Amino acid sequence: MQVIRLTSVLALALAMHATCPLALGDEEKLSEQDKAAKAACTTIGADVTSPPSLPADYPVRSQGDFNACQSYTATLMADSWLIKNKKVAASYRTSPVASYFRFLKGKGATLDSERLGDAFGGTPSSSLDVAIRPPGKACSNEALKDIDPEKFFDYSEQLRKCQVRYKALLADASKNNKTVDDNARAALLNEAQCVIANELKVKGLAYDSLQLAKLLESKHYGDILYDIIDKACAKPGMEVATDGMPALTEVSLYEQKKDATGKFSYKLLPENFSKIKKSVVDALSAGNPAAMAYCSKYLKTTDPEDLEMIYPPERPNAFATYATTSKFDVPKLTEKCGPHVSPVTRREWHNGACMYLVHNSWGMDCKVYDASRKKNCDKGKLWVRENELFENIISVSTF
Amino acid sequence: MKALHATLALAVILATLAPARADERLVLAVGPRSVSLVDSDKLDAVLSEACVPPEAHCQARDALARAKLLATQPRRPSPFAGAENGALVCRELGGAVTMGRDPKGNELGLCRFADDSLVGSSSLAAAARPHEPPANRALRKAKSPSPK
């Protein structure tokens, strides 16, 4: 009987340990070194201050088909500033999609030949500076909430074809010195109107035929999309003034220079290793998030053998250490490591280590991450160990 | 010793009998529509409710199997390695990338197929995670310089 009792107790203890490895009692197991590390790892972050600059339930985004991590990061940074400075309610959210299109517009992307989602990337500071600060206004998520991104791609292609046919109609009339066929023109204008009103589903957005004709005569296809986004954002109550929002200050591990021939060269700035960490900690201590540029590959795998493909075997987990070696080659390294940008919003002692919360923009589940990373993933937000985080940051931008 | 064996055996039985994580139902807004999805423990994937039963035939479920095949093949790296992996896999499998949103504004990338079935793009990414053949690994390790 005693054996059965003992067995049951032991089995229960084993089962509890399996499901709850950090159960009560682990506190006493910490080494002196860990106790000191825990004491140093105070809880700081954008959702810690009262009131928080970023609500704890700030949504996890999914950048989907848009190569726009910089815009998703910039909108979180902008929202935290707007909320902290009481310019908006805590529930306000800036639209990352509108910010992305405004960024493309500001950068002069024509979208004539680029696939919409692949136009080009950038940094959070450039995105904030081009898309949110200088226009003096941020566009609310509400302005574009009914757009189905899948349809947006499909129907924006329809618009592109419509523009091509409209321009061909005008060119044909001009070439043959005849008047434009009114019926054909009206049919094309009607088709474009239908796509914008019925398919893109930008609510309350209407063009009269003159405006529409002007739109289709735009020099570049991108101008049509930019006009649609601007019009959707200009609807009453959809824009928020960003007056007074400061620029982001960037600390980078290297300086990039372009010579007269257009060739880039890179100079390592070793003194910035410690400045990057200080910058993140200072921002979180002040209740602000920090935007970090980093290698995304290390989020996708924690298998040291996979990481050897990116980093040299002697330091398989360290971008920063690699950067100090003679092999430092920024274009080659970033091509391998997958340059990516995400905000860091909180630091705390979590699951037995000092960790930072990375607010990634790959959606609200954790399936994309490998098993060891999943253990520290909370509905798409990732807790990353301090050393691992700082060994992989390439640059950081903070208010 | 016998007690230890019994303990281990019982622990194994308990672990085996432990209930699997219950499937979670998600209702997300996709543009103006509302769609029902299930986070299936067995399939380790989020997909359209209609695709979950084993007898179901739908393109989203087939895509999961096709994504697993992708995992065994050499892949051309994306020029945008910071992009959402699942969106890239979705396009590779002939789907259209779209987005689901819960009432709090949290978003989930989705992949839609011609029969209107949906699968989470991160579920596709997980299925397509490259698994390097052990032989290649051994070869690469042999070629690597020894640690300094």
Image (cartoon, coloured by chain):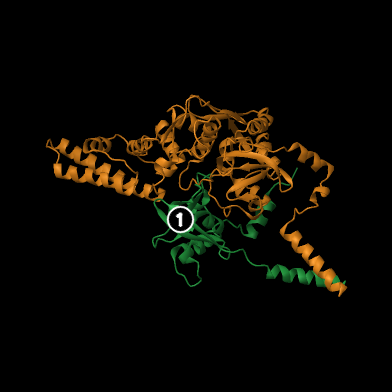
Chain colours: A orange, B green
Give the quadrant of the N terminus of chain A.
bottom right
> What amino acid type is highlighted by mark number 1?
Cys
Identify the image quadrant of residue B43.
bottom right
State which quadrant residue A77 falls in: top right
Q: Residues within 10 Å of mark 1 (few under 14, many from 20)?
A: many
Q: Chain of mark 1?
A: B
Which residue is more in the foreground, A283 or A267?
A283
x and y percent of residue B105 in the render? 49, 47
Q: Nearer the viewer, residue A292 or B39?
A: B39
> Compared to B46, does A156 lie above or below?
above
Q: Is residue A207 left or right of residue B112?
A: left
In the displayed structure, does residue A109 sit left or right of residue A356? Answer: left
Secondary structure beneath label 1 = strand
Residue sitting at the far left: A178
Residue sitting at 87 percent across and 72 percent down?
Answer: A2
Residue B91 at x, y percent in the picture: 44, 53
Number of numbered discs on residues: 1
Q: Quadrant of the C terminus of chain A?
A: top right
Q: Is residue B26 left or right of residue A285?
A: left
User: Residue B81, how many percent across, how many down?
Assistant: 53, 45
* Image location of residue A76, percent across then percent down: 53, 37
Q: From this view, report whether residue A151 is shown above or below residue A285.
A: below
Q: Is residue A137 left or right of residue A317?
A: left
The residue carrying mark 1 is B111
Q: Residue furthest bottom?
A: A1
